[in-house]
Amino acid sequence: MRLNSSAAAVAAASILLGTSSAAAQSKTATPAEVFDGVVKTVSEQFYDPSFHGVNWPDVQARYRARLDKVTDDASLQQLITQMLAELKSSHLYVYRTTPGVKGGLAARIEPVEGTDTVLELAPLSDARTKGLRPGDRIVGGVASLEGPAGTIADVAVQRCDGATTQLKIRRERWLFPEEHPGWRWARIRVAPEKVIGYIRVDRFDDGAAELADQAMEELGKTQGLVIDVRTNSGGNISAMRLASYFIDHDGPAFALMSRPYLEKLGRPVTAADVAEAPKVIGRYRGEDVGEALAKGHGAATFYAEDLGDKRYRGPVIVLIGPGTGSAAEGFAWGMKTYSRARLVGAPTAGAILSGDNFEIAPTWSLTVPVAGHWSGEGKDLNDKPVTPHEAVPETRADICAGRDRGAERAIAILTGG
């Protein structure tokens, strides 16, 4: 998912295990210290002992030879980012932790039909005040929009009618998620005897299990339900609580396996490995997951809860898209695999891994994927996008018109339209 620059560092840390690095210190690290911290942490913590088939020592050596060309923090970050990209993995980012330094447009900007397009704007943002609107295309891409918070960005945009204009917009940090706690739900009566429920979930963080219960308490008697995770960047295992209202499956849903277990295993994961890993049910906080992995020597298998009469029996539509990432993709995969829900939209981000944050040097942090995901049958789910049953891609014309074809199609399915 393409994010505003202020959210990128936070989204890089939108992790399933839920821990965070220590506060930034005042001491300045040298480029060599930062580089060494990255190499050491990835070498020790990256979940896959084979490093995705990449010769990691060779990669390190090639990029270390370029350290003498680093002139500032920006060029150092760029060098390390290029090195990490060779591992072809999500949840792998290096970033500065000094607060308030960087900013960008306080907007959600993602590629639509191959062009960076504004989808949402933060409340109270200068971007909104200055007239940036959903559907605007960023001429020349988003690379030039990042800079010190509070400075002015010259932004060239193409409007929905094809006209171009130049806007001067203050760079701002937009913290992520956009709303707290990132859940909303409602009901709509579409016929005298038919009520459709709607749940939008933008994050599956600690506390989401309780929110799932609240939403389903209010929507449990509806005659159809739409669950919208198109802007959900991830979170943690709490997605399993919501999924448990729909999943009719008493076997293992999926397993998390980290470096210590995979190194000891020394071969591809099988269904038997998943079944033999410690069983975890009903534990939804990041610290719970970390504890389960520690007790299981690097492996834990998660099961849906049996909610009995609370299970939802009506038809369910799950809306997904390229903004559906990480834990939200796990939710989408579980709903597609183990429930009768129908997935509508576009393929997800392809970023299913569990990351953790590490302070590698003063004012520098690194997110590393420390655990992978396998299905109950032992299938490797890591960084695989979830595809919908029915493709309804988002178009710029629809964005400009304020039209949501995914939601339209969901209602049509649920109402027989």
Image (spheres, rainbow, N blue to C red):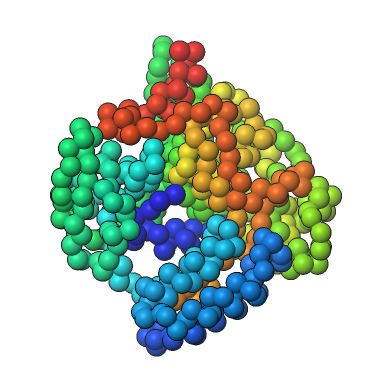
Instruction: Name the residue: 81% across, 67% down.
Output: 264
Q: In this view, does 48 lie above or below 251?
A: below
Residue 301 drawn at (x, y percent): 73, 52
Using the image as rendered, state which of residue 109 and residue 335 is in the foreground.
109
Does residue 250 show up?
yes
Residue 8 drawn at (x, y percent): 40, 59
Quarter-wise, where is residue 331 in the image?
top right
Using the image as rendered, state which of residue 20 and residue 400 is in the foreground.
400
Residue 405 drawn at (x, y percent): 40, 26
Numbered-mark total? 0
Q: In this view, does 349 lie above or below 153?
A: above
Instruction: State which quarter of the image contains the C terminus.
Output: top left
Quarter-wise, where is residue 148 in the image?
bottom left
Does residue 24 show up?
no
Instruction: Name the residue: 79% across, 55% down.
Output: 268
Left or right: residue 372 compared with residue 229: right
Instruction: Name the residue: 57% across, 23% down.
Output: 314
Q: In this view, does 323 lie above or below 23?
A: above
Instruction: Name the residue: 15% across, 55% down.
Output: 168
